[in-house]
Image (tube, rainbow, N blue to C red):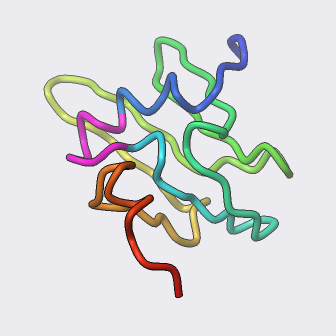
Amino acid sequence: MENKLDGNAAAGLLQEIFPFEMTLAQATCVGCGSTNIVGELAAYMHGMGTIVRCPSCESVLIRVAHTNGRYWLDMQGVRVLQISTMSTSDQSAAPTV
């Protein structure tokens, strides 16, 4: 497998698919239940595509490939993907519950 990168490396590719700031999205692992922001996940990028793994248990969370004008996205390892539609400055001003 290629060199391990942080999830920020994969976030650029994910932002081509999702119209949100993906480095701050939170992914919950099916394998161990831990929740991490995408920027903290482990990313492995190579010619076949990108693999994003849980930093706690190493389970595969996301697989992404881009070929012939199509994206192939497998998110079977993600129980929940929480994406905020507010900017970081808006989030700091948001009321807490």
Quarter of the figure that contains the N terminus:
top right
Q: What stretch is highlighted in magenta?
A: 14-21
Q: Is residue 46 left or right of residue 92?
A: right
- Seen at 57% across and 59% down, the residue is 27
- Seen at 44% across and 59% down, the residue is 92
> Measured along the vertical axis of the image, is residue 81 above or below residue 8?
below
Of all residues shown, which one is farthest toward the left? 69
- Seen at 20% across and 46% down, the residue is 19
Picture coordinates of residue 10 (x, y %)? 48, 29
> Measured along the vertical axis of the image, is residue 94 above or below residue 55?
below
Picture coordinates of residue 13 (x, y %)? 35, 29
> Measured along the vertical axis of the image, is residue 29 above or below residue 39?
below
Picture coordinates of residue 15 (x, y %)? 29, 37
Q: Is residue 60 left or right of residue 37?
A: right
Picture coordinates of residue 18 (x, y %)? 26, 47
Nearer-the-camera pick, 2 or 91: 91
Nearer-the-camera pick, 12 or 72: 12
Q: Is 4 colored magenta in this rendering?
A: no
> Measured along the vertical axis of the image, is residue 3 above or below residue 62?
above
- Seen at 73% across and 47% down, the residue is 54
Q: In this view, does 44 lie to the left or right of 21?
A: right
Count of residue discs: 0
Q: In this view, does 6 lie to the left or right of 95?
A: right
Q: Is 18 colored magenta in this rendering?
A: yes
Of all residues shown, which one is farthest toward the bottom? 97
